Image: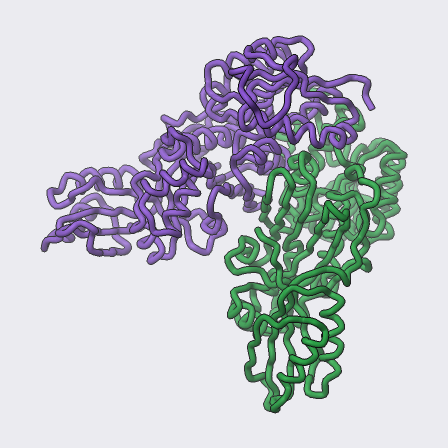
Chain colours: A purple, B green
Amino acid sequence: MSKRTIQIGLCGLGTVGQGVWRHFNRMREELEGRLGTKVVLARASVRDLKKARGVKVAASKLTTDPLSIATDPSIDIVCELMGGTTVAREVTLAALSRGKIVISANKALICAHGAEIFAAARKGGGHFLFEASVAGGIPLIKAIREGLVANRFPRIYGILNGTCNYILTKMEELDTPYASVLKEAKRLGYAEAQESLDVEGWDTAHKASVLAWLAHGVWVRPEQMIVEGIERITPADFKNAAALGYGIKLLGIITRDFETDEIVVRVHPTLLPEGSVLAQVSGVFNAISVTGDVVGTTVYIGRGAGQDATASAVISDIADAVSLLLHGKGAHLMGEEGPTVPKGVRLAPPERIRGRYYVRLTVADLPGVLARVATIMARNKMSIASVIQSPSEEAGLASLVLTTHESDERSMRRALRALAGLSSVRQKPLLLRIGDLGD
Amino acid sequence: MSKRTIQIGLCGLGTVGQGVWRHFNRMREELEGRLGTKVVLARASVRDLKKARGVKVAASKLTTDPLSIATDPSIDIVCELMGGTTVAREVTLAALSRGKIVISANKALICAHGAEIFAAARKGGGHFLFEASVAGGIPLIKAIREGLVANRFPRIYGILNGTCNYILTKMEELDTPYASVLKEAKRLGYAEAQESLDVEGWDTAHKASVLAWLAHGVWVRPEQMIVEGIERITPADFKNAAALGYGIKLLGIITRDFETDEIVVRVHPTLLPEGSVLAQVSGVFNAISVTGDVVGTTVYIGRGAGQDATASAVISDIADAVSLLLHGKGAHLMGEEGPTVPKGVRLAPPERIRGRYYVRLTVADLPGVLARVATIMARNKMSIASVIQSPSEEAGLASLVLTTHESDERSMRRALRALAGLSSVRQKPLLLRIGDLGD
């Protein structure tokens, strides 16, 4: 047993912070036995000192100033569990510049300031650990960085947002519109009061950005990706998809072509073959398919959020951090600075992405409409694979669902603009993508 | 970059050894960049120096004496990839006693001599890494040991043998008897010429033993488990199971009751609800469900065997081993000696295991048979949940499938013996277990 006592400070004692506090203290003795040293949760910062909390923390350990924890010389490990990208950034940089280890669940922060954060860690001799930032309790970061170190990654994709997966699952199961399911999800605490970060795909984009960096060593911003959300999907889309043999999932997808060395990162609702493992993953679960060039495809499933799952990931980072502290900085963070990036790796222009499409049009139920739609598709060299026409819920309107053979985004977008301009097309067309991702 | 060059010796240059050789050398430069030191495959042992191989190895690096590699002072890391439990054991102990790091894919060896091996590692100051021994390329050992370090594990179960899963998948898909599928699997190289280790469940038992040790710190031998294989399953069983809403998978199951501190380890074909993720995993893939008390259930899917998947796991162990060598022995092998075992943890007697059962009887197609069968079940306090009677393939015989409500192994075995003694029961009854394992 080392004589040193490792001191941890938690910046933020909300849902995740309280989970870490509770689970860490419950199993502290066992962890200390495994790690060979004493480890204590020494300090925590909160917004309101007087607020009642689910965990008991001595008043002497609490502060309202997270920066005072990040700069405290007695603190070895700082867990940044506040969220946000302003104070969280300051706290993170302050701790790293002092050579501390920072543990973070903050994907928005990493996505926005990752390059700066990792540079600060290198310069200050600290480390930045982020297992909890993607896929909650699933040890996905460790799997990609250490377990699959022998691999390059032509494709990583997955269900990265439990809120969206919960909403999609309920819409399908209960045949209920998006708005009602969202309301219920908010009531149950599965969706935030401000839902846009989740349902519009931005949270998934932040996580895809972290994974793209981890696998390929490049920072891709959400504005460089295709990012589409789930708000416009209807119960009818699930029926159409099922008739075609698919389920619908919101996916973050990172692909790399090792011949051209082009990377594509995108987030969109995707039709997945019903028999595929990811199509079976329902409710708040996350699921990620990681294809390595040596190992083939591996899949990881688990709870992507929540107090306990996130605490599990943060505590595993604490264990790694303690190991680093005991055995010398730099001891075991292979790939912490991202993989070696072969020169010339670059983002593929989104308009060149190829795939198959699902387009739902709400059209006037009049003769000649299908002909006009088909003509526009043909003019844009989009080859139609199937058509499902069904009455719309509104009188006098019909729903027209087309699927296409493989084409590219440029052609599809052109066709979509032309379709939207037709007088017989009465709502903005809905575009979904068909995922021929294999398993 | 460290000035030291790490030297690796491969004992065994068969399928897995050649995979390691090829993939390691292909990505050596990138790995060295990440690890910060030079790493070379310095020596390899083979049975026959003259045999043609898929990889080119300089004659000066080859030997027929694996022990000479294990005892070579210039070798830092020994990969034991020969298999077997005699020479492999000698090589492993010789290397560990000299403080080297041994990397192994040999679950049979670990199951038989694990306690001795880990003791030798402790005593000699070496380390024993075994990511490739369970679930092939899936980084499952790392996930349990490091990624889920915050957890205790009430339940771990999974498809751990790709050969069996391939056979079961094909039997179901093609409605083909076991013997024909096995023959085809041998032809394709998915089954060994000597198939008993796989199909009788022993390989799964070895892997379950490794997982039980990793999660609970106890060594459980196959003879202390229920171990049943897949040889007596017929295509009709898949139809019956499907009619009841189940698929059939050979599972290794490790459960622990933290109230009584009893552990159960068992291997048997299991009826899994059709909608469950593991029931969807087909072909040579492995899939493991790991339930932690903090994280909840996580699932891991991937190729469980084969040259490339196993090489991927061995190379990840090489990376960890190099890290250990550079940063001091003992640096980062949390739980290498197994978790701290609370005193009093013990194996539950198999006869107390509770569960639901599926029993298939081949009976004379005569009046009164069902009554006799039902009487025996009632006498043994087995409550019948459903009955499927169908004509057997043989004239004059019928197939009678019973499922039961929850009972225990003792009652079920007694009933089974009595059923087997009935003159109207014409073949040994087939017992399968219904897995109410959750997901």
Instruction: Give the percent coordinates (x, y) of residue A226.
Output: 35, 33
Depth check: give the residue in front, B316 or A305.
A305
User: Residue at the spot x=34%, y=56% of the render?
Assistant: A244
> Does residue B199 appear to the left or right of B346 in the view shown?
left
Q: Is residue B208 above or below residue A129?
A: below
Instruction: Give the percent coordinates (x, y) of residue A55.
Output: 61, 26
* Residue B109 visible in the snapshot: no
Q: How many marks?
A: 0
Q: Is residue A405 above or below residue A179?
A: below
> Does residue A375 appear to the left or right of B307 in the view shown?
left
Q: Is residue A269 above or below residue B252?
A: above
User: Residue at the spot x=46%, y=26% of the render?
Assistant: A344
* Residue B197 visible in the snapshot: yes
User: Residue at the spot x=86%, y=50% of the render?
Assistant: B87
> Does residue A220 appear to the left or right of A342 in the view shown?
left
Depth check: give the residue in front, A48 or B40.
A48
Q: Is residue B196 above or below residue A143?
A: below
Q: Quadrant of the N terminus of chain B?
A: top right
Instruction: Give the percent coordinates (x, y) of residue A338.
Output: 56, 25
User: Residue at the spot x=34%, y=35% of the render?
Assistant: A228
Instruction: Give the percent coordinates (x, y) of residue B147.
Output: 64, 35
> Does residue A260 appear to the left or right of A97 in the view shown?
left
